[in-house]
Structures are given as C-alpha cells and as structure tokens.
Image: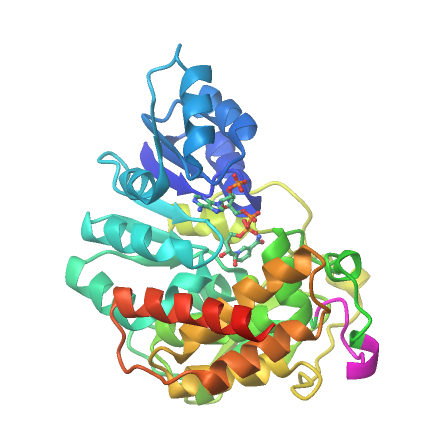
Amino acid sequence: MKNIAVLGSTGSIGTQTLEVAERNGDIRVTALAAGSNIALLEQQIRKFHPSTACVWDEKKAMELRENVRDLDVTVLSGMDGLIAAATEKEAEIVVTAVVGMIGIRPTIAAMEAGKDIALANKETLVTAGHLIMPLAKEKHVRILPVDSEHSAVFQSLNGEAGNKIHKILLTASGGPFRGWTRERLAGVQVEDALKHPNWSMGRKITIDSSTMVNKGLEVMEARWLFGVEMDQIQVVVQPQSVIHSMVEFEDGAVIAQLGTPDMKLPIQYALYYPERRYLPGARLDFAALGQITFEAPDMEVFRGLALAYQAGKRGGSLPTVYNAANEYAVARFLKKEIPYLTIIDMIAEAMEHHKTVEHPSVDQILEAEQETYEFIESRW
Ligand code: NDP
Ligand code: MG
C-alpha cells in the first residue's frame, strides 16, 4: 500500500491521478484538495475516503462539511487547509496538481514534512526552483516529475547515474497555431486557443500551450529539475507528440522516451518509480504513424518562448514576473477581456518594468507576483 495526497484532485491531472490509483488498487488516498468544485470533490471523498479534504473557497468548504457529515473526514479551507492536506501525516507522496503559483507554499510544507513530491505544478519550480531543489536535497525527498516532457527526460536518464547531460531536447507539439503569422494570431479567440491538437488538459495550460509559454515554463522547470544551464535546453517542435523528450549525452548519444499522448503514463511512473506497471490504452503503431517530423520553434512569432529564455537566464525574481504576468493575462483572456496577443505584451512589459531581486525568498517571490499584478492592472 502506498499513501498519497492529491492537491488539485478535481482537475485534469488530479482526476487522472485518481484513475491510476483506483485501477492499481494498492494506493490509499489520504488527503484531497480542490479550489471550489465541491460536487466532484464529494464524489471523490465518498470513493477514496481520505481523512483530510480541503476546499480553497471558505463558503464552499462549509457547504461540503455539511454534505459529508456522515463521513469521517475533516474538511478544511484556504492556505492553512491546503498546507494541512499537503502535510497529512500518512501520505508518502504528495501529487501537486493545483494550477499556478498557489502551489509554492504547500509544496514546500510537504517537503519539510518529508514527503516525496510528484510534481505537476510547474509554476512552483519556475518561480522557486532555487529554493525547492536545495530543500529536496536537505530533506532527502524526491521530486518525481509528472509533466510528460520532464518524465521523458527522467526516464531517459535511468541507468545513467553520474553521466553528464550534454543537452536536453525538449519536444513541443507547436500547439494549434503552429506555422501561423503574428497577423493571423491577432484574431485568435478563446475557443480556438482551447483546442489542443494532441493533449487534453486544463484550461490554463491549454492556452499556455497555444502561446508556447507552456514550453517556456517547461524549459525553466527542466533547468531546475535536471541541474543544467538554460543554454543546454533546446526546444524541438515535433507535431505528432510521439517523442516526449530526449537527452543528448557527451558522446553524442541521444536517448528518448516515446509513447502515445497519455498523462496517465508519467503520473503512474512518478507514483511507482522505479517500477513500471501495466497501463491500458492505445499503443504506438509505428507503421501506421509513418513518420515523425521535426522543426525549429518560431521564436519571433511565439515570443513567449524567447521571453522565457530571457527570464530563465536572468534568474532571480524575473521568472516569477514572467509566470505571474502570464497567469494574470491568461485569466483575463479566458474571460474574453483582452485580445490574444496582449498575453505576451503583458509578460514583456511586466518583465521590462521589474527590478530583479537576486535569490528571492518565498515572501519576495509572492511580493514580485503581487507587484506584477498591480503593474499590469495600472497599465491595462
Ligand atoms: P486544471 O485546471 O484541470 O485543474 C486545477 C486543479 O487545481 C483543480 O483541481 C482546481 O480545483 C485546483 N485548484 C485551483 N485553484 C486552487 C486553489 N486555490 N486551492 C486548491 N486547489 C485549487 O489544471 P491541470 O490539471 O491541467 O494542471 C494542473 C497543473 O499541472 C498545472 O500546473 C499544469 O501546468 C500542470 N500540468 C498539467 C498537464 C495536463 O495534462 N493537464 C500536463 C503537465 C503539467 P477546482 O476544480 O475546484 O477549480
Ligand atoms: Mg508538458
């Protein structure tokens, strides 16, 4: 039996994590947390019987508490509740599948409590990687990547203990607007951007994939996870999403992980590492596939990717500004309040305006986040 806590259990990664747990039958779910979807959270509580549940929204938490009165579960709310769910004493692995920078504090709290982290919440590493990675070492906890590209790199490094990475080749599908011009992108509507060609994901990451900001965040995530320089990470567009990422070693050998686009594979791999388990679903059929093609990303049209390299190379609090501006802009775009290309303008201007703080503490990261929101609000 393995005990896990799932933060963001009602989302795309959260629900797939619970599917993996249910199918395997030897995982106990001891804590669940969500933002406001108490209808689904209640179903999950009734199925998995966690001892702790958290709903960010205080009112919804009260409602849920009433609805599950017949069960032996403590329903908490807010950041204190999220941290309590992340540190629930029986959990060995905490799956961080909340969306956004809200994941920083609970992730740190879980690590301090000695839990391994199955990390989906890339925003945490992007903004606080310089704090998270040393903490993992100090507390002897593992950060097991759930993001498919990072899981692919992680799998490609198996059996390579000590061998230096020459380069990480991070693959990208290119999103729904691959090959488009800036002029054409200007007219993109929310509905267009929510259609990803290969992966079915939450709304925010789907928009991020369309702008290639997701890939930018992933470059920064990879830099911390695998201890390489930004320049050692190259983005390769591979529209079929068959190669999930690759590692080039010093002798020029390239090791890759391939598969169908199914997040249950990296989720299950993180939960059972280093063991592989049977996973039902479609398999790669190379003859039917015919070919796998490659191209370079267009960093002029997809400026969000170029800005990520700039933020990651500068480091300090600048990646936080990149991420916070994007979170804010995407939320506004999803509400149809700003045009598509304004997402990237907001990131660029917020980065330009910001005075970078070196090695920011958690408080300084959250201050930089707040300042970024205020700057954008004053400007747009
Ligand atoms: P979703 O939007 O589908 O789910 C987000 C989850 O977080 C929901 O359970 C939501 O609850 C919960 N949540 C939101 N705000 C809060 C809060 N304040 N407190 C507690 N819980 C909260 O996102 P995804 O599953 O797509 O993505 C989650 C993370 O994983 C992101 O960081 C993303 O970048 C990363 N990721 C996702 C992939 C995917 O395939 N989806 C692939 C690789 C990485 P509620 O439902 O109640 O709002
Ligand atoms: Mg990914």
| Camera-nearest residue between 243 and 369 | 369
168 versus 371 height, above or below: below
Horizontally, is 141 left or right of 262 in the view?
A: left
Check residue 180 for magenta coloring: yes
Q: Is residue 156 visible?
A: yes
Residue at x 39%, y 62% (from the top left corner): 124
Q: Quadrant of residue 313?
A: bottom left
Magenta-tinted stretch: 175-184
Judged from this view, the residue extending furthest toward the top is 70
233 versus 362 height, above or below: below
Residue 44, horizontal then vertical, whole percent = 49, 27
Check residue 91 for magenta coloring: no
Q: Main secondary structure of the magenta part?
A: loop
Give the quadrant of the C terminus. bottom right
Horizontally, is 228 left or right of 323 in the view?
A: left
Q: Quadrant of residue 343?
A: bottom right
Residue at x 33%, y 80% (from the top left corner): 316
Residue at x 57%, y 45% (from the top left corner): 12
202 versus 19 height, above or below: below
Residue 72, horizontal then vertical, whole percent = 33, 16
Residue at x 35%, y 84% (from the top left corner): 356
Specify the quarter for ligand 2: bottom right
Give the quadrant of the N terminus. top left
Q: Quadrant of residue 305?
A: bottom right
Q: Is residue 256 visible?
A: no
| Camera-nearest residue between 346 and 102 | 346
Horizontally, is 144 left or right of 12 in the view?
A: left
What colouring method underlies this structural image?
rainbow
Residue 147, horizontal then vertical, whole percent = 50, 60
Residue 162, horizontal then vertical, whole percent = 28, 77
